[in-house]
Amino acid sequence: MKRPDFMALALAEAKAAAARGEVPVGAVLASGNKVVASAGNRTREMNDPTAHAEMLVIREASQKLSAERLTDLDLYVTLEPCTMCAGAISFARIRRLYYGAADEKGGAVVNGVRFFASPTCHHTPDIYPGIAESDAATLLKEFFQARREP
Ligand SMILES: [Zn+2]
């Protein structure tokens, strides 16, 4: 059976986030060929600075599976995770991390603190950057351009 395109689903979540006026980042947690949780950013809607797409799917999947660790799950996210989310990914023991665009300003994987390479990081997922990178980057660029226009 062909693996579903989880990054396409994450991109759809990012687009839905943009339509809600949220920064367009989307995430999917998958177990094999099955989606366990999917979400887009909801920081504005929830008045919660921690409501990044990655945090929301980690919370939802942990609840659904009644598990503190998500060792068999793979995370697909449209943007390079920030420091907070990289920490959560590590604590959740997520198996693989697929992400789209790199984030020079807020990223913590290949930019910033490079969390997974730090000595205080005790679990590093397998990391696959640049998945559907241009789609994710275009979405963010268009969102911020539209917001700058009067
Ligand atoms: Zn984050």
Image: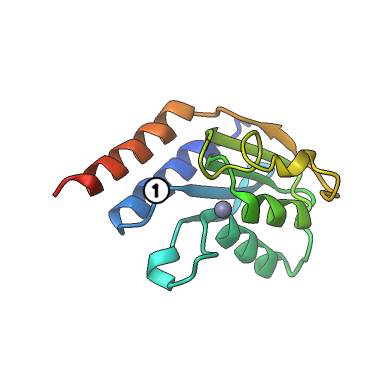
Amino acid type at image mark 1 = Pro
Callout 1 secondary element? loop
Residue 31 against residue 5 in the figure, above or below? below
Between 121 and 28, the one nearer to me in the picture:
121
At 39% from the left and 52% from the top, the residue drawn is: 23
Ligand 1 closer than 8 Å to the CB at disc 1?
no
At 36% from the left and 32% from the top, the residue drawn is: 138
Q: Which residue is mark 1?
A: 24
How far across and how far down the image is residue 4, in percent? 55, 36
Residue sitting farthest toward the left: 150
How far across and how far down the image is residue 50, in percent? 55, 64
At 45% from the left and 48% from the top, the residue drawn is: 25
Q: Quadrant of the N terminus?
A: top right
Colouring rule applied to residues: rainbow
Query: Based on the displayed image, in which of its 4 quarters is residue 91 positioned?
Result: bottom right
Mark 1 packing: few (<14 Cα in 10 Å), some, or many (20+)? many
Between 90 and 98, the one nearer to me in the picture:
90
Query: Based on the displayed image, in which of its 4 quarters is residue 115 positioned?
Result: top right
Residue 53 against residue 95 in the figure, above or below? below
Query: Based on the displayed image, in which of its 4 quarters is residue 130 positioned?
Result: top right
At 47% from the left and 43% from the top, the residue drawn is: 9
How far across and how far down the image is residue 38, in percent? 52, 54
Q: How many marks?
A: 1
How far across and how far down the image is residue 2, in percent? 60, 30
